[in-house]
Image (spheres, rainbow, N blue to C red):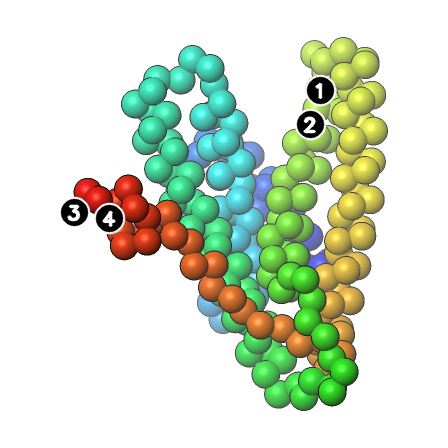
Amino acid sequence: MFSTKANAIFQDVIAKYHQINTVDQPFTNKYDKSDLLEHLLYRKCWIDTVQWHYEDIIRDPQIDPVAALKLKRKIDASNQDRTDMVEYIDGYFLEKYNDVSSKSDATINTESPAWGVDRLSILALKVYHMEEEATRANASNTHRAACQTKLDILLEQRVDLSTAIDTLLEDISKGNKYMKVYKQMKMYNDDELNPVLRNQK
């Protein structure tokens, strides 16, 4: 199953990141581009993991405003990388199922396979960090119990989301569903589409 592979890669990435546990650490993809899907999934989750920790840092109420603005720019760039990776992963699936003929009554899903993968990657991070909190030795019993309850829900969500992604891919492979890739067409980074940037010219 695709989701089994994806979840294993995401857990591997998150564990690797936390060996050093800093947003400034170098990135090395353990898969080369001959293993394209694995390469893309590994890179995707690394981007998500670094951004997760960016989001923690920027919420520090004592953060220096100049440092916060610099970090905000990094988050913006990371969001663009994240979106690009989703489109690359969807491109992989489009190519994989390129020869499949959609049935006359085939329908399109509310989200593409890769946007489901995006949610699965973020969910892996939620599971990892909620498990940390559920087992944190210096937390109260009440805190740990509350986090364990949340962790149980997250684990159930992962089963459900994994099943949904696998089902969607199977439906696409059989022609019961078809997919399209829509570019996100983000406007706020574009010098012409963002009025603030346009007026700076």
Q: CA distance from mark 4 to mark 2?
A: 45 Å
- Which class describes the residues within 10 Å of circle 3: few (<14), some (14-19), or many (20+)? few
Q: Is residue 4 left or right of residue 191?
A: right
Of 35 and 88, the residue lying toward us? 88
Q: CA distance from mark 3 to mark 4?
A: 6 Å
Say if 104 sits above or below 164 in the image: below
Judged from the image, the secondary structure of the residue bearing numbered disc 1 is loop
Residue highlighted by disc 3 = 201
Residue highlighted by disc 2 = 132
Q: Which circle's residue, 4 or 1, is located before the other in the chain?
A: 1
Evaluate if marks 1 and 2 touch, with contact meaning CB atoms under 8 Å apart.
Answer: yes
Q: Which circle's residue, 3 or 1, is located before the other in the chain?
A: 1
Q: Is residue 122 left or right of residue 156?
A: left
Q: CA distance from mark 4 to mark 1?
A: 49 Å
Image mark for residue 198: 4
Instruction: Identify which amino acid the numbered label 3 is placed on.
Output: Lys
Evaluate if marks 3 and 4 touch, with contact meaning CB atoms under 8 Å apart.
Answer: yes
Residue highlighted by disc 1 = 136
- Residue pictured at 59% horizontal, 83% vertical: 98
- Residue pictured at 40% horizontal, 42% vertical: 76
Judged from the image, the secondary structure of the residue bearing numbered disc 4 is helix
Evaluate if marks 3 and 2 touch, with contact meaning CB atoms under 8 Å apart.
Answer: no
| Badge nearest the viewer, 3 or 1 | 3
